[in-house]
Image (spheres, rainbow, N blue to C red):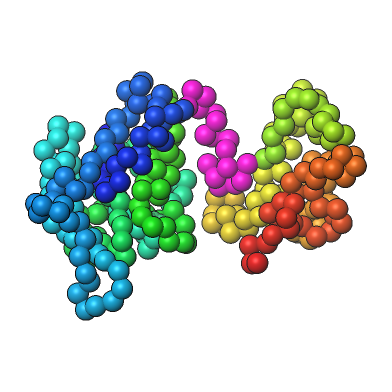
Amino acid sequence: MYIDVVTIFPELFAPMLGVSILKRAQEQGRVEVKVHNLRDYTTDKRRTVDDRPYGGGPGMVMKPEPMFAAVEALETLSHGIRRRADRSECQIVLMAPQGEPLTHALAQELSGLRHLVILCGHYEGVDERIRSQIAHREVSIGDYVLTGGELPALVLIDCVVRLIPGVLGHQDATREESFSNGLLEYPQYTRPATFRGMDVPTVLRSGDHEQVGVWRRLQALARTLTRRPDLLSRDTHGPRASSMLTPPSQEATAVKPWRNAKGSASAGFRPPEVDKGATAVKPWGSTGVSRNG
Ligand code: ADE
């Protein structure tokens, strides 16, 4: 896969692209990432990339000329976007807070492309002609506004690249993780079996793979229902999944075995998600912060 990024801050990318799985994926030739400085496509002495908005208002808007020139230059590359018409091969994505939300499903779709071009917006926005004439789609990483599209672009690259077949050695790693099956991930444990009075659930040490599977699925469902019920209503699990679960008010008790708080208070440690009363579910862990405030 080829990824081209157009940005006014190319130096932000090297640190992330040069470590861990992203680095290895490039070394293995599974992905080639090139970062292009938008200012290289300006024609004036000051390398201007923005201008005041027509109609007035605060802030600056990214000019169309450099972005059009950059994308046209990419078209001349051998792997280039000459195939723009075929969206299953190549897509140009503009990172923008008003874009479609980045989800696992979208990352999965983009990981199947041959060529992904990512445009990073900046300032108060980008000229509408960039949106309408260049970008195939706009993608947002969340309902908040960042100072630019660079961090969102890195988020997109990270979650797309790890889904390219062969990038993660262990393919099950993506199959089982949060969101890949529409559910949040079940709780994970490693050694020691008992740590500061907190035991690993017995079933996980039983060697009974079927029971482990059932336990994990129930935990994933319970966790999703408690923290992100919106995911369950999306479809794939439907009524069957919901009927496997107790209502949220009983869930804390029902799934208590994995919330083993034994001895945790005396150890001065409160594991995430333990709720002392066992009646109030605190979906976001020990702070008790709820999504609604
Ligand atoms: N640029 C600024 N904020 C953004 C966001 N939330 N997602 C994508 N691009 C952005």
Q: Please provide percent x and percent y for residue 175.
A: 53, 34
Instruction: Name the residue: 37% across, 63% down.
Output: 98
Which is nearer the eye, 174 or 78? Answer: 78
The N terminus lies in which quarter of the figure? Answer: top left
68 relative to 99 in the view: left or right? left
42 relative to 102 in the view: left or right? left
Q: Residue furthest bottom?
A: 55
| Above or below, 128 relative to 269 | below
How many numbered callouts? 0
In this orientation, does residue 154 appear? Answer: yes
| Above or below, 8 relative to 111 | below
Instruction: Name the residue: 80% across, 45% down.
Output: 270
Which is nearer the eye, 205 or 24? Answer: 24
Q: Please provide percent x and percent y for residue 165.
A: 41, 28
Is residue 170 located in the magenta-colored stretch of the structure? yes
Residue 83 quadrant: top left
Instruction: Name the residue: 20% across, 65% down.
Output: 51
Q: Please provide percent x and percent y for residue 92.
A: 26, 48
Q: Please provide percent x and percent y for residue 95.
A: 34, 53
Instruction: Name the residue: 30% across, 46% down.
Output: 9
The magenta-colored residue range is 168-185
Q: Residue furthest front?
A: 46
The C terminus lies in which quarter of the figure? Answer: bottom right
The quarter of the image that holds ligand 1 is bottom left
60 relative to 257 in the view: left or right? left
Is residue 31 located in the magenta-colored stretch of the structure? no
Residue 201 quadrant: top right
255 relative to 167 in the view: left or right? right
Magenta stretch prevailing secondary structure: loop
Which is nearer the eye, 178 or 24? Answer: 24
In this orientation, does residue 259 appear? Answer: no
